[in-house]
Image (spheres, helix red, strand yellow):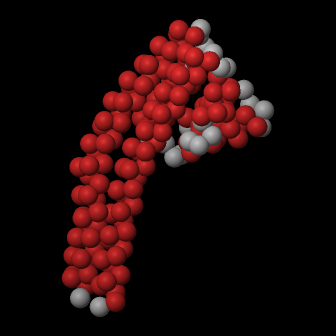
Amino acid sequence: MLGAVCLIFAGAAAGCLQSRKLREHRDRLQAFLKFLSEVKTEIAYAGVPVEEILERHGKNIDFLLPYFQARQNGEDFLQAWGKAAGSDLLLPQERTLLRNFGEGFGATDMQGQLSHCALYEELTHKELDTAEELYKRKGRLYRMLGVCVGAILALVLI
């Protein structure tokens, strides 16, 4: 009996883990969207340099930590940003979005930067909508599937 209960809990844990991956994807996109909004505000109203904007608003974003570590090691902006964009925390579509944003970030005048941020806000909104829908549809499915698979294995082994 104890083994059966353990199998059910193991299945439930596996389902919760898969569901958590979907939630983390959604949360990363929300954090990046908030970051883009803050960047636009800083550029439009304060004319703050890119490095300072990242220091102010990027420290609390987990997938940007490799950027800050690389900058402390003396790497230039693009190399450091590439490390953040290549993070194992990110899904392939997130890596592409982040890498492409970094290539144009700080490369033009103020109006160009505002347009660049607006473009990536729109792209991130689309990704976020997809991630929200995926989490709503598949998150509960993964949790329930994990419990069911665990219960089926427990029944088969009893």
Q: Position of residue 145 (x, y in %)?
A: 24, 64
Q: Is residue 74 left or right of residue 33?
A: right
Q: Position of residue 133 (x, y in %)?
A: 26, 42
Say whether residue 57 is visible.
yes
Instruction: Give x and y (percent) for residue 37.
Output: 48, 27
Q: Residue at x 31, y 83 (%)?
A: 5
Quarter where residue 59 is shown = top right
Left or right of 2 on screen, residue 42 = right
Q: Quadrant of residue 102?
A: top right
* In the displayed structure image, the side of residue 1 where residue 111 appears, left or right: right
From this view, report whether residue 43 is shown above or below residue 15. Answer: above
Image quarter hosting the C terminus: bottom left
**Residue at point 26% right, 58% down?**
140
Q: Is residue 103 visible?
A: no
In the drawing, does residue 38 fall left or right of residue 29?
right
As drawn, the residue found furthest toward the front would be 45
**In the rendered image of this protein, does residue 139 appear above or below residue 69?**
below
